[in-house]
Image (tube, rainbow, N blue to C red):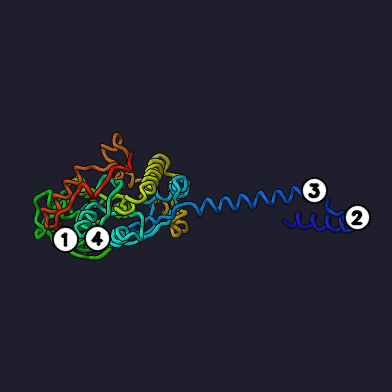
């Protein structure tokens, strides 16, 4: 830059010494003006193109995380823009996500199937339009020395969960339901979101978490664990992409575009995890500054997330497909457990129209 400025200064002195020549039609000034006009036209076109995109908000039920890599990739690689969408990400608790989607203050969100069914029983008109995880991701982990390897071993043990709400509690009830174990046979402790600390400090014998998160972190710290997966006990339908009935009815192209762009990116994440991880770093500022071992830990989380996105039916049915049998099993469980007492039309709680 210094060299360029020096050259320009010398050039201006030479021009001044030689005298100026009035600009004529067709002189060398004209191409510069044309170039400026082209640049301005391109900028205006880009602004108009961006302004023409339909703005939508996608709500996550957690903080920024590599488990949302498919959304980040669809945004970064322009897949949403190709569908005419401009997407903003919002991070909140799941109950708030469901309510806000139903009210129309958010277009899309992630929510578990049990939350969708329970919400519809309260006249919140949310609909699952694609499945996110084909396997319920909640697990119950314990130190290997405790020798707790099966649901039967949970009897008489202290089990730490955030509270009697959310996926951990639903997952625990599903495991007990599938194995004919009464809740009273366990020492259930509501410990907030301190499951890892509670387990490592031996305040509880078993803790709840997500299979692609807490157990991985503890094992990376050298702690040997036994893990009981909810998905191995009961086919509880997991989380999915939700939208409101109103959005589906009034702007189906928006829903279809968002679903298709997300699923396209999801397959790319599976095929190119290194690229997906690098893209995710741009959406998780604190991870960018993390030491290398912290990044490697998150890289392992991303890899394990793939396990829950798929099951044996995924190769033929495709990513995002809705397993109706697991929905029906979940509805039966919710009713038998007394969690759902109102009538719910399960066929209206999901749609496969945007997966094709």
Q: Nearer the viewer, residue 58 or 255?
A: 255
- Is 26 left or right of 312, judged from the image as shown? right
Which sits earlier in the primary sequence, circle 2 or circle 1?
A: 2
Separation of marks 2 and 1 at Cα, in angstroms = 93 Å
Taking depth in this image into account, of 150 and 265 the one nearest to the observer is 265
Of label 1 and label 3, which has the lower sequence position? Answer: 3
Examine the image and state in which quarter residue 185 appears.
Answer: bottom left
Earlier sequence position, callout 2 versus callout 4: 2
SS of the residue at dot 1?
A: strand
The quarter of the displayed image where residue 318 is located: top left
Q: Earlier in the sequence, mark 3 or mark 4?
A: 3
Disc with the residue nearer the chain's start (4 vs 1): 1
Q: Earlier in the sequence, mark 2 or mark 3?
A: 2
**C-alpha distance separating marks 2 and 4:** 84 Å
Task: Residue at 37% x, 51% y: name it.
Answer: 68
- What x and y, as percent, mark residue 44? 59, 53
Q: Which of the two discs, 2 and 4, sits closer to the camera?
A: 2
Kindly give the residue lying farthest to the right in the view shown.
18
**Element type where label 3 sits in the image:** loop
Mark drawn on residue 18: 2
Disc assigned to residue 158: 1
Residue contact at pointers 1 and 3, CB within 8 angstroms: no
Would residue 117 be found to the left or right of residue 307 on screen? left
Residue 186: x %, y % from top left: 12, 59
> Can residue 278 be seen by looking at this rendering?
no
Question: Gap in Å between the C-alphas at discs 3 and 4?
Answer: 76 Å
Residue at x 19% of width, y 56% of height: 170
Residue designated by label 4: 199
Circle 4 residues within 10 Å: few <14, some 14–19, many ≥20: many
- Give the labeled residue for mark 3: 28
Q: Residues within 10 Å of mark 3 (few under 14, many from 20)?
A: few
From this viewpoint, which residue is outermost toward the top? 316
């Amino acid at each position: 830059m210094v060299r360029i400025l020096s050259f320009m200064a010398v050039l201006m002195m030479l021009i001044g010494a030689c005298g100026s020549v009035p600009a004529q039609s067709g002189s060398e000034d004209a191409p510069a003006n044309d170039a400026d006009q082209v640049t301005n036209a391109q900028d205006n076109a880009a602004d108009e193109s961006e302004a023409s995109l339909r703005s939508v908000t996608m709500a996550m039920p957690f903080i920024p995380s590599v488990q949302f890599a498919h959304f980040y990739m669809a945004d970064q690689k322009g897949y949403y823009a190709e569908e005419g969408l401009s997407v903003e990400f919002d991070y909140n608790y799941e109950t708030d996500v469901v309510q806000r989607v139903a009210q129309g203050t958010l277009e899309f969100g992630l929510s578990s199937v049990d939350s969708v069914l329970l919400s519809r029983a309260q006249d919140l008109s949310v609909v699952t339009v694609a499945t996110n995880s084909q396997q319920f991701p909640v697990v119950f982990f314990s130190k290997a020395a405790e020798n707790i390897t099966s649901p039967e071993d949970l009897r008489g043990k202290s089990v730490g969960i955030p509270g009697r709400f959310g996926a951990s509690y639903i997952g625990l009830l599903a495991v007990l339901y599938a194995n004919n174990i009464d809740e009273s046979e366990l020492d259930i402790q509501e410990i907030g979101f301190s499951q890892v600390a509670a387990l490592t400090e031996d305040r509880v014998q078993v803790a709840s978490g997500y299979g692609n998160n807490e157990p991985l972190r503890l094992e990376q710290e050298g702690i040997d664990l036994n893990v009981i997966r909810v998905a191995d006990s009961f086919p509880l339908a997991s989380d999915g992409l939700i939208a409101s009935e109103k959005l589906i009815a009034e702007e189906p192209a928006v829903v279809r575009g968002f679903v298709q762009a997300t699923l396209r990116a999801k397959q790319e994440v599976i095929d190119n995890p290194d690229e997906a991880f690098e893209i995710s770093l741009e959406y998780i500022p604190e991870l960018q500054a993390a030491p290398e071992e912290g990044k490697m830990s998150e890289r392992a989380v991303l890899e394990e997330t793939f396990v829950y996105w798929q099951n044996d039916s995924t190769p033929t049915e495709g990513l995002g497909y809705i397993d109706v049998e697991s929905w029906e099993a979940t509805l039966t469980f919710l009713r038998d457990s007394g969690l759902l007492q109102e009538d719910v039309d399960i066929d209206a709680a999901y749609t496969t129209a945007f997966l094709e």
